[in-house]
Image (tube, rainbow, N blue to C red):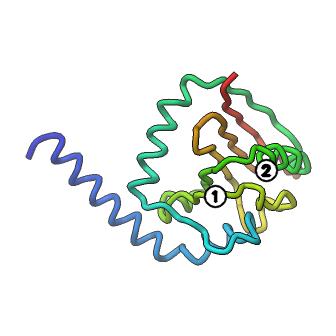
Amino acid sequence: MSVSENHASEYRKELLFRRATGKRICGTYLSKVAALFPSLDRPELLSLEETDSILERFRLIRAGLSQETIRTPVEGVRSEFSLIKNFEREFYVLIDEDWKYCGLLKVGVIGLLNVALEFGAEILEDLVFISADMSLAVDFDFFEMEGVRLIDIKRWSKE
């Protein structure tokens, strides 16, 4: 077996494992999607192969984008969500680790985003938005330090 055949075989095994896990956690994932986009009728979840392809493309593009990181109290997330909501483009959304097993969420109408979302209720720790044209990405990492709820926000954008 060649190296590329071996790699393809390993990838197929990984996909099978991810799909099996995805079937177990899909209900929880969809409740997180509903918390984030309450009026989204039919969430569009991409296949794991599409998910991997999009994230690989973003990984390559991200190197050419400017990046800034800020830490804010959890209350500051609403203004950040409002900025994303006003971007008015199609977005890919990664929720916690669930996307690895269920696929990326593709949202055509980002205006449906619930800016009043509370981290820790449905969405536990991580939320990433990547615009479909890959000109903007925002990563929200929720955590608690000494009893204070904080969010690290990483933003990648074209200058």
Residue 78 location in percent, x, y? 87, 51
Q: Which mark is residue 1?
A: none
From this view, report whether residue 97 is shown above or below residue 128: below
Q: Secondary structure at mark 1?
A: strand
Residue 108 location in percent, x, y? 64, 57
- Quadrant of the image containing the C terminus: top right
Out of 96 and 67, give the one closest to the viewer. Answer: 67
Residue 136 location in percent, x, y? 66, 36
Decide: few, some or many residues near mark 1? Use Cα within 10 Å; few <14, some 14-19, many ≥20.
many
From the viewer's perspective, is 145 left or right of 33?
right
**For the residue marked with disc 2, what is the amino acid?**
Lys
Which residue appears at 50% of the width and 65% of the height?
Answer: 102
Residue underneath mark 1: 107
View extreme (left): residue: 1
From the viewer's perspective, is 115 left or right of 91?
right
Decide: few, some or many residues near mark 2? Use Cα within 10 Å; few <14, some 14-19, many ≥20.
some
Out of 40 and 49, give the one closest to the viewer. Answer: 40
Q: Which mark is residue 85?
A: 2
**For the residue marked with disc 1, what is the amino acid?**
Val
Q: Earlier in the sequence, mark 2 or mark 1?
A: 2
